[in-house]
Image (cartoon, grey):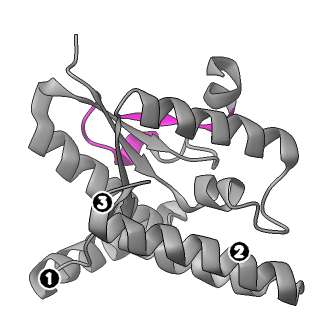
Amino acid sequence: MSGGTVLVIDTSYLLELYRVPGYFNNRTHKAIKAKFATAIEQKSLRYVPFPVILDVANHIVDGRDDGPRKQRADLFVGHVLQSFDSAQPFVITPALDEASLKELLRRFANEFASERVGLTDTTIIHEANRLEQKHGKSHDVHIWTKIDVSRLASLIPNPTLSLMTTMSLEIQV
């Protein structure tokens, strides 16, 4: 039995949570919002890799709804800034140092790019593996994502690391 849960949150989950136009639907938004509430209540550790922050911000400005875009940006930035002070609603993992970034870029080019896995997703996988090593057997580590993960499973070296997709989300909620 594990001592807790570690969640590494993908861009797709945050786009649903913040209801970014063109990237969410009401049914999935409600399910993900409930999942976040449960994770907070259960004191799960929630991590957002820094590149995900950049992705979400870019998607927020893609929309054509100037008023709601500004409100959505304010809400998102408010949560990000709050995270630095209180680790709520999530912990933002820092940008990598130069040596780690170089290694990540090499892995991206050599392993992930041919599988059509982008640099942000490569970072998410890297972060999940780092957290799994950090917490060992004391926590279950999951990646929360909406993307089809069948191509990612072989790229995650540790079989105890799991991917929680929209399908598993809808079954579990």
Which residue occupies 48% across, 73% down?
53
The residue lying toward the viewer, choosing from 123 and 72, is: 72
Asked if residue 53 lies in the magenta stretch, the reply is no
Q: Which residue is mark 1?
A: 97
Asked if residue 163 lies in the magenta stretch, the reply is yes
Kindly state the secondary structure of the residue where label 3 is placed.
helix
x, y percent for residue 77: 53, 77
Left or right of 56, for residue 112 = left
Q: CA distance from mark 2 to mark 1?
A: 30 Å
Res 163 seen here: yes
The tag earlier along the polypeptide, 2 or 1, is 2
Q: Which residues are magenta?
A: 153-166
Q: Which residue is mark 3?
A: 86
**Three-letter code for the amino acid on which mark 3 is drawn:** Ser
x, y percent for residue 10: 51, 56
Q: Which residue is mark 2?
A: 72
- In the figure, 135 relative to 81: above or below? above
**Three-letter code for the amino acid on which mark 2 is drawn:** Arg
The residue lying toward the viewer, choosing from 90 and 61, is: 90
Which residue occupies 22% across, 28% down?
139
Q: Nearer the viewer, mark 3 or mark 2?
A: 3
The tag earlier along the polypeptide, 3 or 1, is 3
Left or right of 65, for residue 1 = left
Q: Nearer the viewer, mark 2 or mark 1?
A: 2
**Three-letter code for the amino acid on which mark 1 is drawn:** Asp
x, y percent for residue 23: 78, 63
